[in-house]
Image (cartoon, rainbow, N blue to C red):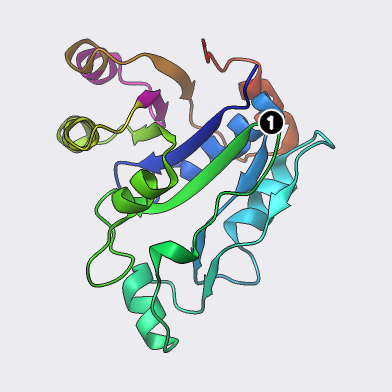
Amino acid sequence: MNPQKYFITGIGTNVGKTIASAILTEALKANYWKPVQAGDLNQTDTHTVQSLVSNTQTVFYPEAYRLNTPASPHAAAKIDGIEIKLSDFKLPETQSNLIIEGAGGLMVPLNDTHLVVDLITYLNVEVILVSQNYLGSINHTLLSIEFLKAKNIPIKGIIFNGINTPETENFILNYSGLPCLLRIGLEDKFTKETVLKYAEKVTLNP
């Protein structure tokens, strides 16, 4: 069976992409790659996922860009005096499954002309969309889905994060026709044990 490669993107910033990435990495015994890290270089998303994954098979690849300022990648890169180029991104060569964690949402700029969605197209990988339940999330989720479809980017499914809101989730699933891969509830703290618990619930049909 060919290894699976999934790009984890969200309907916005701070919607739970890193936690979802850790759970998927554990569930698939996948390798992990964060192409762009902006800010928090002493405690990156890669560090966070490393601290939450229990299996010993996962390989963590270095970021293509490590930017000092917690800001949009295009702005953080300018502060560092560099320009992010799509040609600098190379998918890690691996026979294992691969989880790729994006930065922010689909329309986050990488440079003056390219967005995160352009990176997804460039890498030619399938998307898993993380949706956090909040007032307005239906709009943000469906807009993200429609944009991905307009770009002919395949979507594996949706992960819902946060307060369980059946009316919201059911409408999104029914309208989009996409499957729910996982529901992540509110937790006081995410630990290796918590991640293992959710990893067993992931539904990723071929």
Q: Vertical placement of 8 versus 184: above or below?
A: below
Disc 1 target residue: 26
113 lies above or below 31: below
For this rendering, which residue is in front, 4 or 130?
A: 4
Residue 166, percent across and down? 30, 14
How far across and down, in percent of the image, does residue 4 sit?
Answer: 57, 27
Image coordinates of residue 155 in percent, x first then y, are 35, 26
Is residue 142 left or right of 95 when viewed as pictured? left
Residue at point 34%, 27% (across, down)? 154
Specify whether residue 75 is painted magenta: no
- State the image quarter where residue 143 is shown: top left
Can you tell which quarter of the image residue 202 is in? Answer: top right
Classify 111 as above or below 169: below
Q: Is residue 18 shown to the viewer in this render?
A: no
Q: Is residue 58 left or right of residue 172?
A: right
Residue at image position (30%, 52%) is 118
Magenta stretch bounds: 155-172
Where disc 1 sits, the SS reads helix
Whether residue 110 is visible, yes or no, is yes
- Judged from this view, the residue extending furthest toward the right is 56
Quadrant into which the N terminus falls = top right
Q: For residue 177, what is the image quadrant?
A: top left
Query: Residue 83: percent from the left, percent from the top?
Result: 38, 79
How many C-alpha atoms fall within 10 Å of the one at disc 1: few (<14), some, or many (≥20)?
many
